[in-house]
Amino acid sequence: MATMSPLRQRMIEDMTVRNLSPSTQQSYIYAIAKFSRHFGYAPDRLSFEQVRAYQLHLIGQKRSWSHINQVACALRFFYGVTLGQTEAFERIIGGQKPDKLPLVLSAEEIERFLDAVTGVRNRVVLATAYAAGLRVSEVVRLKVSSIDSKRMLIHIENGKGGRDRYAMLSPRLLEILRTYWMRARPGLWLFPGQDPSEHVSVRCVQAACRAARRRARLAKPITVHTLRHSFATHLLESGIDIRIIQVLLGHADLGSTARYAQVATNLLARTTSPFDGLSVRVIPPN
């Protein structure tokens, strides 16, 4: 087993004391490692000129602006925090993401998609992602104890930005989760992976998502995040207040409306999920 370098260990410690999420830490470490390999030198031997050259390389490779900006964040952290070069926060800049509209599926397309998902666990995972508007990183890390059937809420632990929040638990989703639990009898994790002590991986769920899209013959490039976009759009179209939707999605950057967005959890629990209006059978009868 390879020994971790002191520099990498220091960066991990810097991220840990700042409570960066495990997924953010992993992506930052991966980005710095690729940056280092690109030039063939340890990252602390590379200057801001190499950083600029690497960013131009990524643009030339036609990488997405989300990826390019994530790399910029990793580089700013490494140089600015771990190496103590505070000018990095000004010198390493990100790009402006194109203002694209989110891809949204119709209710009929959601039904076709869920009908095409194979495997009970995968189908329930993706149904839960749509029914509650969850990020893929949130739905795979749900625990059995996350489901609060008394208050009709789902407790999201350590979500984006390391924040806890509540998502809605619709009556129909609760019925499906209860049936799933009776059949699968999961332990700690609601959706375990091949190793029951670990949760199902993001990669596995995304692969199931791609396979279902092909099986359903849907032309749109569907990801788990597409289900989240669709959840929010369908709620908005049904007349739900935008402030409630912002809270349900766990969005923190609300600008001038931020202080009005923190509505009571009993209001969230009374909001009907668009999933309840679908006729798709997620778990087939015995």
Image (cartoon, rainbow, N blue to C red):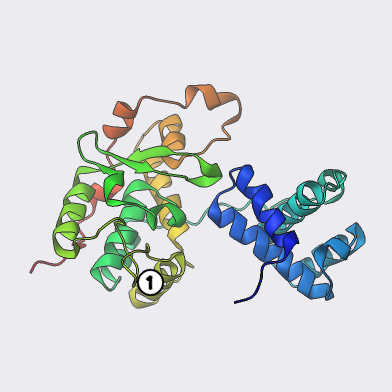
Q: Is residue 129 above or below residue 214?
A: above
Residue drawn at x 45%, y 26% is 262
Q: Residue reaching furthest left?
A: 286
Q: Which residue is identified by label 1?
A: 208
Residue 180 versus residue 85 in the image, above or below? below
Q: Quadrant of residue 75?
A: bottom right
Q: Position of residue 48 (x, y in %)?
A: 89, 57
Q: Nearer the viewer, residue 84 or 107?
A: 84
Q: Residue at x 29, y 56 (%)?
A: 190
Local secondary structure at mark 1: helix
Q: Measured from the top left, where is residue 56 in percent x and y?
A: 83, 65
How many numbered tags mark residues here?
Answer: 1
Q: Quadrant of the C terminus?
A: bottom left
Q: Position of residue 65 (x, y in %)?
A: 69, 59
Packing grade of label 1 (10 A; few <14, some 14-19, many >=20) is many
Outermost residue, top side: 259
Task: Specify whether residue 64 is in view.
Answer: no
Picture layout, residue 228 above or below residue 109: above
Q: Position of residue 192 (x, y in %)?
A: 32, 64
Q: Is residue 134 left or right of residue 163?
A: left
Relative to residue 127, is residue 94 drawn left or right? right
Q: Quadrant of the N terminus?
A: bottom right
What residue type is disc 1 on? Ala
In this view, the residue in front, 37 or 93, is 37
Res 219 seen here: yes
